[in-house]
Amino acid sequence: MDQVIGVAGCGRMGAGMLANLQAAGFDARGFDIRPLPGIGTDIAAFCGGLNVLITVVRDTQETDALLFDTQRVIDQAASLDTILISSTLSPSYVMALRRRIPDHITLIDAPMSGAQIKAEAGTLTFMTGGETSAITPLLNAMGNTIHHMGDYGAGMTAKVLNNLLAASNTAMTRLVLDWADTAGIDESRLLDLINSASGQNWLASGFEDIEFARDPYAPDNTIGILVKDVEAALDLAPDHQITLPRAIQEHLLSLMPRTRP
């Protein structure tokens, strides 16, 4: 545990990941461009002595800013030897990072699933690609399930496919609940039924615990992230199989707040 670990992007997911690393005894620090309690905004201080970087920033633009442009961690962190990509990004972008990052830095894609509640509990599910044996203790501190999917890039490919299903479950569950309102069906009774019947899905089963379950679309919230993740999954789609993913995106974009009964 003598390595210095840095978590960049300490929002809904990154803050819980950082807290669990620290609780497990790792020398871990956080960075965010926003002032947050206990999180640094000084990128030079964050990079000093940094060995392992875990990126949990929002998208490819923020990843570019972190690694190459604004914060320039690749230039500033002289001791950096490993990067874990834990953001959900386009698989083709992730593969292209290998050509942009010096060869002496190990790249591992390790996106995660579980929403904020599991990030805080340290029970995330990780999907990994690349050589992960050296960082398994870190993943075990932040999650309780690791699926190694293959070579570098395979973890991200699996993640965007998983999130495509999560986006479709979110869109359809919200639609079903709206229809139930119109038909006069009690929300809690319907959710109980779904959880024990053939319509069971992650969002419906955790509807009272998942922090974004009732949210509308906004560019900077989790519904907006799901829209972004569907776009990332389209990296993998043959041209003739994009109609359904695009319809899911459009429905998510139209979501309004869902009030509690």
Image (cartoon, rainbow, N blue to C red):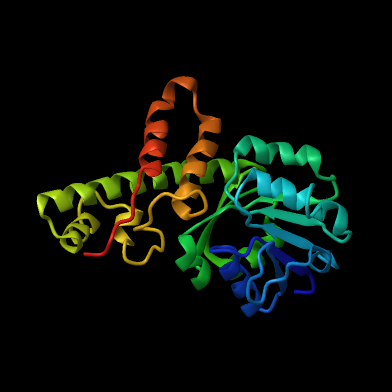
Residue at the right extreme of this rendering: 78
Q: Quadrant of residue 98?
A: top right
Q: Is residue 45 above or below residue 91?
A: below
x%, y% of residue 188? Answer: 20, 63
Compare residues 140 and 203 and report the one nearer the observer: 203
Is residue 174 left or right of 37 when viewed as pictured?
left
**Residue occupying the point 44% across, 27% down:** 242
Compare residues 54 and 129 and report the one nearer the observer: 54
x%, y% of residue 20? Answer: 59, 73
**Residue occupying the point 24% across, 58% down:** 195
Is residue 254 left or right of 72 when viewed as pictured?
left
Is residue 255 left or right of 67 when viewed as pictured?
left
Q: Visible in this render: residue 130?
A: no
Q: Visible in this render: residue 18?
A: yes
* Quadrant where the image shows the C terminus: bottom left
x%, y% of residue 21? Answer: 64, 72
* Quadrant where the image shows the N terminus: bottom right
